[in-house]
Amino acid sequence: MITIPVELSERSYDIQIEAGALERSGVALASLGDVSRVLLVTDENVDALYTETVAAALVDRGLDLDVVVIPAGEESKSIEMANSLWERFLEVGADRKSVAVALGGGVVGDLTGFVAATYVRGIRFFQIPTTLLAQVDSSVGGKTAVDLPGGKNMVGAFWQPGGVLIDPNVLATLPADQYRAGLGEVVKYGASLDADFFGFLERNVEKIAARDPETLGAVVAKCCEIKAQVVSEDEFETTGRRALLNYGHTFGHALESALGYGTLLHGDGVSIGSLAAARLAKRLGENGDARFSAIDGAWVARQTELLERLGLPTSLEVVGRRIGDAPETSIERLVDLMRTDKKAEFGKLSFVLPTGLGECVRLRDVSPEDAAAALAE
Ligand code: GLY
């Protein structure tokens, strides 16, 4: 088992990664101590595959369990669904000693975490992520949220889990598009924060494509290690350090939002957004900003090559669209959406841009013209 500590003083917890970990979920939950009831939240897809294993492991440790199954998909990350979970928790008698467990991907994790953060002013919460995206990103760091019709993750709370249990074996059943999209976040870590990891990914493309369990364990562990370090330095995203986890996200979110949530997978948006961010950095470098002088055509091509080798999209063609093919995907609309991004401040365009391999900075006042040019390339 690989254990990665997330150091957050009294909110510290461990990420445990082990093949077959689902069968140990009872031990992990019981170790939280004094658990009156476990509220296991999952979606219909994951329920069919893994609830039985997890439920058996929990019951085996003498834990009282209620299972709540929600519809799969981004639509479930709503205040209406949060309301139905709050009511269900009340109905089954959940109290402050209860623990909400998220068994699933990012939607289940973000929603369950938000409900845990708010029910009776906060109960404990535990993450068992089953998608690559959730294992390498959303299950770690305590960001919880639901969406508003006008914006993703607009209502939420920082609420750290009491632990994260990751079983890389579950990735074997992940649909191909979900697996690929998770790799968008994986490449993000290498390109923007860890050059050695980027090299590791380049050397292991075939094994990653084959979902080799040992390689996947190493990939997930490295991503969690990078994220745990960043989160422990800036838990509430106040110093700018944690914001660096958002490489590729400003462009990516705008594309996701322009097409309507659920059309473009988040990790696919991050992939396309990483390419646009690299082009923007290259452009700024060519225009005399010395911080970006290392981001030349070769840098952009190297990142593009890795994304493509991993089967990740570099354009909207992945969903049969093109930038500018309709009013909602026009460059003006995309720039407008970036202005209203949750990360934008005072309507200024904010981007995380590479300064070298595994290095990046946040720029908070990029001109709309430069952003538009990077999208148009
Ligand atoms: N996904 C970015 C963060 O957790 O800060």
Image (cartoon, rainbow, N blue to C red):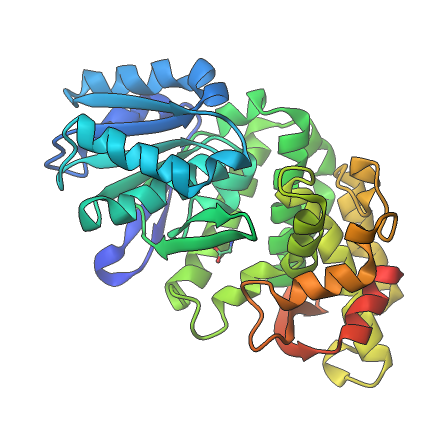
Depth check, front residue: 227 or 256: 256
Residue 270, position as x, y percentages in the image: 67, 50
Residue 15, position as x, y percentages in the image: 37, 43
In this orientation, does residue 330 appear? yes
Dividing the image into 4 quarters, which one contains the N terminus?
A: top left
Q: Tell me if 281 is positioned left or right of 22 in this view.
A: right
Q: Tell me if 334 is positioned left or right of 16 in this view.
A: right
| Residue 116 in the image: above or below residue 171 | below
Q: Tell me if 164 is positioned left or right of 272 in this view.
A: left
The image shows a total of numbered marks equal to 0
Quarter where residue 69 is shown: top left
Dividing the image into 4 quarters, which one contains the C terminus?
A: bottom right
| Residue 29 in the image: above or below residue 369 | above
Looking at the image, which residue is at 87% across and 61% down?
376
Residue 4, position as x, y percentages in the image: 38, 48
Depth check, front residue: 160 or 197: 160
Q: Tell me if 31 is positioned left or right of 84 in this view.
A: left
Depth check, front residue: 84 or 305: 84
Looking at the image, which residue is at 61% across and 65% down?
340
Quarter where residue 60 is shown: top left
Looking at the image, which residue is at 72% across and 43% down?
203
In this orientation, does residue 2 appear? no
Residue 370, position as x, y percentages in the image: 80, 74
